[in-house]
Structures are given as C-alpha cells and as structure tokens.
Amino acid sequence: MFSRRNFLHTTIASSGTLLLRRSLRRQPTVARMPVVVSTWDFGQKANVKAWEILSKQGRALDAVEEGVKVIEADASNMTVGVGGLPDRDGKVTLDACIMDEYGNAGSVCFLEHISHPISVARMVMERTPHVMLAGEGALDFALSQGFKKENILTKEAKQAWEKWKKSAEYKPIINVENHDTIAMLALDHQGRLAGACTTSGLAYKLHGRVGDSPIIGAGLYVDPDIGGAAATGLGEAVMRTVGSFLVVELMRQGRTPQEACMEAVERIAKREKQPRDMQIGYLALDRNGEVGAYSLQKGFTYALQDEKHSTTVAAHYYLK
Ligand code: SD4
C-alpha cells in the first residue's frame, strides 16, 4: 500500500539518483560572458574572428556571422562554402541559417555560386519579411543585394567528385571521418545570444537535397530567454527529431545544456535503425554562458573561447 513513508523514501532515493546523474552529466566548461563556441576543431579559427568582435563589446550576431565566414572562405575545407564537395551531379549547393538575440531567423538553402551563404541568410532575416529562401530564388536575392556569382567548385573538390563518380556509390552517410559543418553560438557582453550554421551538406548527395543546417529548429535554434543549440552530422536524423529546438526546449524545462544535448542524442540513438553508421553532434550554450556538447559516436569536438580559455574540447559520446 502507498504510505507517506514509502513516498518520502522513494522521493529521496530518486532525487539522489537524479543528483548523481546531474553531476555525472556536467562538463566543467562553465564560461562567463562573452563566450563563443563552435563545432569541430576548425571552430577555433572561426572563434578567433568572433572573439575580435566580442572582446570589443561587439554584438553576438556580428560575431557569429564573421566567425563562420572564415570557414566558408577556406577553400581547403571541403564541407563548408568555397571548396565544399559537390552533389552527385557535380554542383556545390549550400545551406545556412542565422538567428539573433530577438529570436529572428534567416536562412538559405540549395544555394549555388555564392561563397558566403551565411551573409545572404542574414539579409533574408533583416531585409525581407521571410525566413527562408531556396535555390534560384535565393541566388536571385543574393545577386540583387550585391553578391557576386562565383565558381565555388575548387579543382580539388572536382577531382574528388570525379574519383567518386568512377564507383558512384550512393552512400551519403556521415560517419566519424566525414563531417564538418560549422555551427557557432555566441553570448556577448550584454548577454545577447546569436547562432549561425553553414555547410555544403552531404558530399555527393542527390541534387536538391537539403539537410538540417538551414532548417530553423533542426540545425540551429536560439531562444533569447533560454539559450541556443546547434547540430552537426547526418541531417536527416537531426531533422526527424527537430534536434536543436529539442535541446533548447529541454533546457527550458530545466536540463543543463549538457543534459539537454545528451537527451537529444539518446533519442536519435534509440530511434534510428543503424545509429553506428552515422555521427550526430549537438552543441548548446545557455544564457548564462554554460556549455554542453554530446555526440553519438567518438570524435566530435568543439572549440570554446572566452576571457580565460581558448581551447578545443572532445565531447562525451553515447555509443561506446
Ligand atoms: C547536413 N548536417 O547537411 C549537415 C552535414 C554536417 O558535419 O553537419 N556535417 O546533413
């Protein structure tokens, strides 16, 4: 029979377990304002640029845009902007989105010939009444705003595609060797939050395929009152679970950024049939500057910059 004594006992025991889980789940990366975090090791290079802005009391939105542009412009990086690997028809199609401290959002997807899709996404946010523009419409808009049409398929990316074509194995899988979308979250000295995410998506994808990265709530989400989250990895799995929105909503319900990332990854691990064939990484930053990161498999890293740290951190992961 249910008694008050049993009830107290159960409550104390389960809150003890909860506390233990919480302490195990916390990563020691509490940062002060301002702070910037971004996905993967190469995020460090992007953080340096973002920090130039944040350390001069600049706005988080400018920091994330300028930060990810460093990686978009880097032709040696084959998964973002210039130098990105093409789809299976040999076309480089880019996805990007951005959110500001008011929760405004802008996005472009399936965009060709433009080296800085993140800046086009920002203009969609600031200069149109819309959130998302796609394909030719996004290109027309970019050109109307003064962007130049460029060839962003580098010699190296073309050669890699030609080599792939010989076997033309259609296997757009992201695993531990094949990744690199840049997503960045920043909190500035005034506590303004912003996020940006930009990618060329899966290499050799079907022409027209759009991933999670430009989808508000999937690849990126910022709620100014709670925090922000971003995803990298196999976009289809992130989209099916509206991953970044989920992470932010879990934080709203009281989870730490770390707990929220873990729960979102666990959800994917449980519902995907072959989780070992993919990689997913979440990064979260709450409005107090606390950071969380977690991935499905070993190998996900993120870069963090604040007044005291400039570092890359290997995230904990689910599949051992
Ligand atoms: C996509 N999420 O297009 C992107 C790819 C990625 O690390 O994040 N790669 O599915």
Image (cartoon, rainbow, N blue to C red):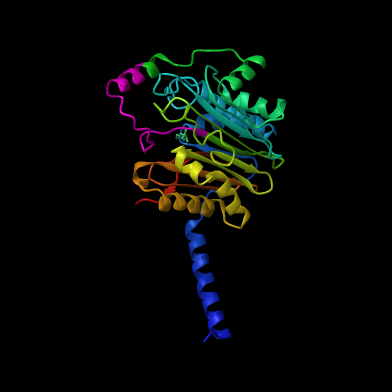
Confirm whether residue 30 shows in the render. Answer: no
Point 52% across, 77% down: residue? 10
Q: Is residue 279 left or right of residue 126?
A: left
The vertical placement of 3 against 38, above or below, is below
Q: Which is nearer the eye, 24 or 79?
A: 79
Point 59% across, 19% down: residue? 139
Residue 273, horizontal then vertical, whole percent: 36, 48
Number of numbered discs visible in the structure rendering:
0
Q: Is residue 171 left or right of residue 264?
A: left
Residue 102, horizontal then vertical, whole percent: 71, 39
Q: Quick check: is 173 in the magenta stretch? A: yes
Q: Which is nearer the eye, 18 or 211?
A: 211
Point 62% across, 17% down: residue? 140
Confirm whether residue 165 shows in the render. Answer: yes
Q: Quick check: is 200 in the magenta stretch? A: no
Residue 191, horizontal then vertical, whole percent: 69, 43
Residue 74, horizontal then vertical, whole percent: 48, 21
Q: What stretch of residues is rendered in magenta?
A: 159-182
**Residue 83's image quarter?**
top left
Q: Which is nearer the eye, 278 or 186?
A: 278
